[in-house]
Amino acid sequence: QIIVGDFNGDGIDEIVIFNGSDWSIPYLGLLASDGAGGLKLIARYDGDILGWGGFAPNDKFYKANLNGDGKDDLVVFNGDDWSMTYVGLLRSTGNGFYMTNRYDGDIPGWGGLARHDELFVGDFSNEEGDDLVIFNGKDWSMAYVGLFRANTSGLSMTARYDGDIPGWGGLARNDHLILGDFDGDGRCDVFIFNGDDWSMPYLGMF
């Protein structure tokens, strides 16, 4: 996995590379410009970041500015390799990362992290830091969407939609969420597309 972001807040992007499959242990590295058109290694984590409990092949990383300090951070999700699903928040120091929160099996209010949870990052509140959306259409009797506010203490749920978002007509297994600021107000919005579950394809804007 290659994630591009400004992890030290200097206005120039850096690169995070994660490999959980090709070596004897998984690795995560932070690379920055060397000033000569190339990259130099700033930090490398061999097998784990303290507190996460061990990198695994199916760890998925997402870029998010969690506390509004101008430095991009990382959210890590794993729903495949352990007895329960985990979400971790990795804050950037500018020259590396450290774990601030780990959610074992659930984020309060969500009702249970599950294997097919899909995570999306965007600033819905137009306040400090990015927020998180989780969608799951496969693991429960109905599909769910949850909105989570990120802050210095971690993640807190602000809304959960059980089976439907008013006007959509029913969340479904194969809904696809697409995030972006569609009206230019500085807050992230959501498109939902479904081309599989109904008699015709649908697109909704929220």
Image (cartoon, rainbow, N blue to C red):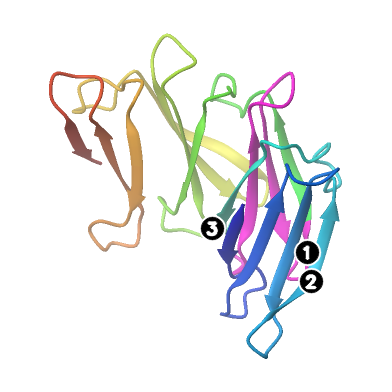
Looking at the image, residue 123 lies above or below residue 199:
below
Residue 70 falls within the magenta-colored stretch: yes
Amino acid of disc 2: Ile
- Is 102 left or right of 116, judged from the image as shown? right
In magenta, the rendered stretch is 68-97
What is the secondary structure assignment of the residue under circle 2? strand
The residue wearing badge 1 is 96
Image depth: mark 3 or mark 1 in front = 1
Residue under the image location 36 percent in, 53 percent down: 188
Q: Kindly report the distance in space between the C-alpha atoms of the residues bearing marks 3 and 1.
A: 19 Å
The front one of 129 and 27 is: 27
Number of the label disc, if any, that sits on residue 129: 3
Image depth: mark 2 or mark 1 in front = 2
Residue 57 falls within the magenta-colored stretch: no
Q: Quadrant of residue 166?
A: top left
Most extreme residue toward the left, as rendered? 200
- Is 205 left or right of 49, judged from the image as shown? left
Number of the label disc, if any, that sits on residue 42: 2
Residue under the image location 16 percent in, 29 percent down: 201
Do the CB atoms of the residues marked 2 and 1 lie less than 8 Å apart?
A: yes
